[in-house]
Image (cartoon, grey):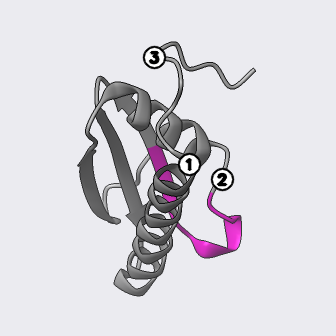
Amino acid sequence: MFEEDNLKIDLEVPFADETISRIVFDVLRVDVEPKRSGVTKLLTHQENIVKASFSAKQAKQLRVSLTNFFEKIDLIVETIEVMGPPVSANYSHY
C-alpha cells in the first residue's frame, strides 16, 4: 500500500476509554484523503487507541494531512465534551 521511497509517519492516539476511541475512529475513518493530496492514510482501532499511518512523497503533504487529522480529533473531542459522555457503554452508530 505504501511505496518504499515515501515518507511515513505512524501515530498512536490514546483516549480515556474504548468507547470514546471508537467514536473518534468511526468519525475519522469515513474521511478519506483526497487523491490530489498525494497522501495515503490507514486507520485502525485497538482498545482505547486510534492508530494512524500516513505516507506521502513530500514532507509538506504529510504536514498538511497531519494538521488536518489533529484538528479533526480536537473537534471530535470538544464535541464529546460539550454533548457529554456516551450514555451507554454499548456504542452503536447505526
Q: Nearer the viewer, residue 63 or 25?
A: 25
Q: Distance between the residues labelled 3 and 1?
A: 20 Å
Residue, x 58% and y 49% (percent of image)? 83
Task: Pick the residue in front: 26 or 15.
Answer: 15
Q: Percent x, y for residue 39?
A: 52, 65
Which tag, 2 or 3, sits closer to the chain's start?
A: 2
Which residue ends up furthest to the bottom in the rendered image?
Answer: 60
Crowd band around label 2 with a 10 angstrom C-alpha radius: few (<14), some (14–19), many (20+): few
Q: Earlier in the sequence, mark 3 or mark 1?
A: 1
Q: Where is residue 55 in the image (x, y as percent from the top left)?
A: 40, 61
Secondary structure beneath dot 3 equals loop
How far is mark 2 from mark 3, CA to CA? 25 Å
| Total count of labels | 3
Residue picked out by circle 2: 31
The disc placed on residue 46 is: none
Residue occupying the point 75% across, 20% down: 94
| Residue 71 shown left or right of residue 35 in the figure | left
Q: In the rendered view, would you say 16 is above or below 57?
A: above
Find out whether the residues at labels 1 and 2 contact each other: C-beta distance under 8 Å.
Answer: yes
At 65% from the left and 53% from the top, the residue drawn is 31
Q: What residue type is labelled 3?
A: Ala
Q: Is residue 54 magenta?
A: no
What amino acid is labelled 2 in the image? Asp
